[in-house]
Image (spheres, helix red, strand yellow):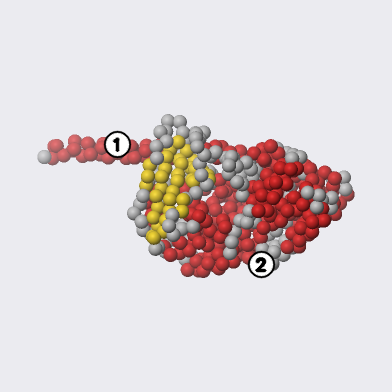
Amino acid sequence: MTRHRLPIVFLLAALLALAAGAYGWQRAHRAGRTRRALLLDPIPGEGITAFEAQSLGSLLMDALETRAGLAVTSLPSLPEPYQPKGNLLLLRTRAARAGADLRLTLEWAELGPGRDGAWHTVAPRPGAPVAVLDAALDALPVDITPADPALLPRDPGRFWELLQADSAVYSNADLDGALALGQRLAVEEPGCAAIQASLAHLDTIRVLQNPQPLDGHVDLARAAADRALALLPGYPRALRFAARLLSDQGRQDEALNRLREGLRLHPRSLNLLLALDYASRTAGLLDIALGARERMAALWAGAPVAPPTGFAYLYAGRVDAFEASLQTRPGLVPDGFTAFNLGYAALIKGRREEAARRFQEAEQDATAEGHFRVLAKVFRFQLEGKTADARQALDGLDRSRMGLQVPDGEFTFTMAEAAAFLGEEGLAMDLAQHAFSQGFVCASWYRASPFMAALQPLRRWQSILQHVDERQGRLAALHRPRDFGL
């Protein structure tokens, strides 16, 4: 018997090696063939609202970014017929609530050359939300790391409360109540990164919109984002909020340093590339911003629409590319933010009637951020020849934003453009100076904005430009596209 045992051992070892090799090849093949995912908004079933379904979609995006390293695009629905460029994992889900249990159906299809596009269905047994999500994600044809226990709430009740709190961002309703709920959840489960990220998001939205001074809330929002990042290093959604807060305080150097580290961990994260676009374009570093846009466009190529809001194109003088980045699919009504910027682009290109119509669409979207709705009214009133009404609305908007801790210098500069459009040169320069103090230092757009053309020869404007150039120059000396792999 001893003589026959050795060949059997060799045979078993060979079989194990073949199996391991096949498994390793399969993992490499699965990881290599799919780098992009298109996630359709979850369809809400019983016990879950449409806005809570959107919140669930953001958690799914978090998992796909952090656990599978995918570039994830989210869309409400898919146009038919649809053929992506390259390989793409298409995901659609239905979600319902039964008590504290999640009932989830996840369907996936691999699209692209050599893929049959067949739909596969995963329907884990209803149960605790985190367990159900883990089971669904583990069935996908991608290389996915084990779930990090710090990402999602472990308690089923708190999972549902997180969706409820986070949904206020999408509905733009009862932000105060949602913030109170988020604060309670953060105390009850301090080790959950998604709760901390939601708290940071809610606080960020509040300080960006609330006309009343909210002392300390910027620090609270940033601290929540930092806690999320301590729990889950490089967590793209939390880092995007942190970078936005820093950028809007004129601290783009710190934001860019942190984004560089985050992109080393998650190089295909569209969340981080969008944050990089924002931080660098507001700093006037358009080579970095355009590089981020180019990377996004390559990763986004599987989606039927372009990456959103390409302000870097606008600031670089590529108005057509900016307008194209705002386009929605035929038959899809744009949200208020998109409608505002479509009106803004139409006005720049001299299409005044279309601009007025788009601005009115922005005003009528109750879920849009209030300051965009008011500024849309300013532009529309002026287009209709109601200059006094336009000035009154702009004055009211200016007063309402005086107490904001993070006033968003990019938006303040658009207010300056509105003032110039009204012929109020002094107010336009006041607002532009505010935009500079709030961190918006894109020198090329200070000079190229068609609304600001009449200001260019003025001595005070030249003084403002000198300060903008100096700050942008300091940032340009510290950051290069290659630092971000661009």
- Between the residue at mark 1 and the residue at mark 2, the CA separation in whole angstroms equals 63 Å
**Mark toward the start of the polypeptide (1 vs 2):** 1
Rate crowding at label 2 as few (under 14), some (14 to 19) or many (20 or more) other CA atoms within 10 Å: some
**Amino acid under label 1?**
Leu
Please state which amino acid type lies under the numbered disc 2.
Answer: Leu
In the depicted structure, whether residue 406 falls above or below residue 284: below
Foreground residue among 185 and 325: 325
Q: Is residue 478 left or right of residue 241?
A: right
Is the residue 113 above or below the residue 268 in the image? above
Give how far across and how far down residue 239 sits, in percent.
Answer: 57, 54
Q: Position of residue 15 (x, y in %)?
A: 26, 37
Q: Can I make out residue 400 in this image? A: yes
Task: Tell me: 331 left or right of 88.
Answer: right
Which percent across, then down, holds residue 79?
52, 39
Q: Name the residue under label 2.
A: 214
Residue at (87%, 45%) from the top-left corner?
457
Q: What element carries label 2?
A: loop
Task: Judge from the rendering whether residue 24 lies leftward or rightward of residue 87; answer left or right.
Answer: left
Q: In which quarter of the image is residue 25?
A: top left
Quarter the N terminus occupies: top left
Question: Residue placed at 69% from the left, 67% from the top?
Answer: 213
Nearer the camera: disc 1 or disc 2: 2
Residue assigned mark 1: 18
Residue 448 placement (x, y as % from top left): 78, 42
Residue beneath the point at 53% across and 65% down: 182
In the image, is 303 to the left or to the right of 397? Answer: left
Q: Which residue is drawn at 50% across and 55% down?
A: 50
Quadrant where the C terminus sits is top right
Q: Residue 354: which quarter of the image?
A: top right
Q: Nearer the viewer, residue 413 or 385?
A: 385
